[in-house]
Image: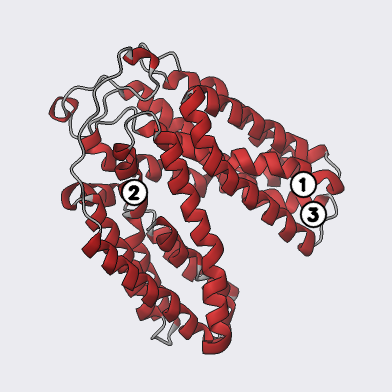
Amino acid sequence: MHAVNDALFAGLYPLLPLIAVDLSLSYGEVGAIKTAFSGASAVLQVPGGLLAERWGEQLALALGTSWVAAGLIGLALVSSFWLVLVIAALAGLGGNIQHPAAASFVSRLFEDGRRGTAIGTLNFAGDLGKMLAPAIAGTAALALGWRGGLLTLAVSSLAFAVLYGLLVPQPTLTQPEPAPDSSADPTSTDMAPPAALGRWGIAHPGPFIALLVVGMLDSAARGTALTFLPFVLADHGADPSTTSISFAVLFAAGAAGKFLCGPFGDRYGAVLTIALSELLTAGSLAGLLVTPLVFAPLVLLPLGFVLNGTSSVLYAAVADHVAPERRSRGYGLYYTGGQVASAVAPILYGLLADQTGLNTAYLTLAVVTGLIAPLSLTMRTVGSRR
């Protein structure tokens, strides 16, 4: 489901030039369509989590993906920029359910210490959808035009979502017996009943706030690094082709990081994994500024691995601080903070770059990212050694 949902959002990218030609759109109008579609999927993460709690995650996932797919079908049938813009925004609203519902559901399925591995696999599946969707939609568009390409992706996704809702049950999940030494188990949380934890079900408010801040700083680093990486490479003499290859290397390493950082977090603990990955991220960001272009892939590989891989560990850590019955809203809150930070940070660092130069801004980003490592120590709960 994560692969299909992410495919719906990624599949629109290769079709945008064809849409622009067909509807005589400017670059600004193309950007507005993309912002409306993606932005709408970020603004209602908390309500999306609340709906998942009320309906059950499996049904909510099916309805959310069906909503997005139906919206894209409608988008393929209109011929006005303003209608495309409005329908893109309406379609994007369905994407608010996927992340809080799926992460909550998977976290409750794996309360036995394998949570990071499971959420890392879930995270990786989304990247598979992002990689496959442009090829599917683009290939179909060669024969059928952008409308046919979009309909191919949307109709097949809608059919999958309907079958998912009908055939995949919402199991009743029971809590596992606590480990003999719960203080040594990084996934063990001594939580009171949800009613005693308030509306949000947060068992450890201090560590959860620290996790939220760490997650926002991590998202800010990722969003800013990706935004200004082409300019850093250009300063080293990279042409558009080299920059494209560099991003391919970065994203391939990022997919591997999402898959592998989760098991590392399960084995060695979230705090240690996050601290090490943020230090490696900071070092790689700084290293890019002084690395000759020919050796840039040697820096981009570790950078991509930790820049995207850390998210799997952070997502799994959310479940350590929120009661299972309230976890969807907890994930909704976490994802909202991360997406806000990812949207705002590039603007702030861009203004800094305007005043001080790109290298200074990128080095500042590296320093701030490095400071996440000591901050992550405050995520520990009382009695936890990891």
Identify which residue, 1 or 374, lies in the foreground: 1
Give x and y (percent) for residue 14. Answer: 57, 73
Element at label 1? helix
Vertical order, 66 against 141 (above or below): above
Residue at image coords 27%, 42%:
329
Element at label 2? helix
What crowding class fits label 1: few (fewer than 14 Cα within 10 Å), some (14-19), or many (20 or more)?
A: some
Residue at image coords 50%, 49%:
124
State which quarter of the image contains the C terminus: top left
Inspect the image, locate mark 1, and give the three-letter code of the amino acid beneath it.
Answer: Pro
Q: Which residue is mark 1?
A: 297
Identify which residue, 252 or 310, lies in the foreground: 252
Q: Distance of mark 3 from mark 2, alpha carbons? A: 38 Å
Q: Quadrant of residue 117?
A: top left
Element at label 3? helix
Q: Distance of mark 3 from mark 1, alpha carbons? A: 14 Å
Give x and y (percent) for residue 120. Answer: 47, 42
Q: Which residue is mark 2?
A: 102
First of labels 3, 1 by sequence position: 3
Residue 234, disc: 3
Identify which residue, 194 or 172, lies in the foreground: 172
Q: Please tell me whether mark 3 or mark 2 is closer to you in this view.
A: 2
Residue at image coords 32%, 32%:
111
Give x and y (percent) for residue 38. Answer: 44, 61
Give left or right: position of 303 versus 319.
right
